[in-house]
Amino acid sequence: MKTFKVSSLSLIASSLLIMLFGYTAVSKILDYNKFVFQMKLVNVPMIPYLASSLGIVLPIVELVIVWMLCKNNLRVKGCYASFLLLFIFEIYITIMLLSGEKLPCTCGGIISQMGWKTHLVFNAVFMIISTLPIIYKPKPGIFNSAVRIDYN
């Protein structure tokens, strides 16, 4: 893949992740009470007890990931963080599916309207998207790296 295509792929993938995490973080912040209330209903160990803390920490983590994805020098680390957070969400969604509970998603905004199975697929797609900039990193070349001259 040429450097231009790889850079474009990285930018598109990062932009999609920025929109996802930015949107869900803002939704959780704006509807904090509903977000925390829904987490307290979940029959997953520790989550009801940590709901108030998670209601603060989770949007902050999402916004930090957004910030990392916006910085060229932190973009790949932001993609790793995105993958990890989405993987944790996948575990949570799987537990919800296996429990058989019919609780609403706590994601916030329009994303919370998805069913659990749809949400599982949605997150899996975004997990794949988060790996693209990691797998297809631009290789150092004439246009994207500094020239280093050794005089020794």
Image (spheres, rainbow, N blue to C red):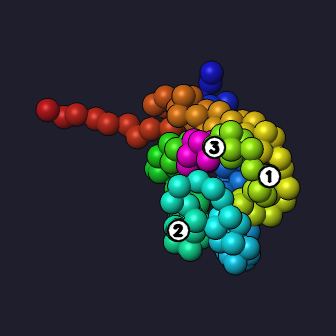
The kind of residue on which mark 3 rests is Ile
Residue under numbered circle 1? 102
List x then y, in percent, for residue 39.
65, 64
Q: Residue at x 72, y 41 (%)?
A: 97
Question: What main secondary structure does the magenta stretch of the protein show?
Answer: helix
Range of magenta residues: 85-92
List x then y, in percent, for residue 98.
68, 39
Mark 1 packing: few (<14 Cα in 10 Å), some, or many (20+)?
few
> Is disc 3 in contact with disc 1, using a CB cutoff of under 8 Å?
no
Considering only order in the chain, which callout, 2 or 3, is on the residue closer to the N terminus?
2
List x then y, in percent, for residue 64.
53, 62
CA gap, disc 3 and disc 1: 12 Å
Q: Is residue 32 above or below residue 135?
A: below
Q: Quadrant of the C terminus?
A: top left
| Residue 49: assigned label | 2
| Residue 82: assigned label | none
* The quadrant where residue 105 appears: bottom right
| Residue 95: assigned label | 3
| Along the line of sight, the residue nearer the viewer: 120 or 9 | 120
Mark 3 packing: few (<14 Cα in 10 Å), some, or many (20+)?
some
CA gap, disc 3 and disc 2: 17 Å
Q: Is residue 8 visible?
A: no
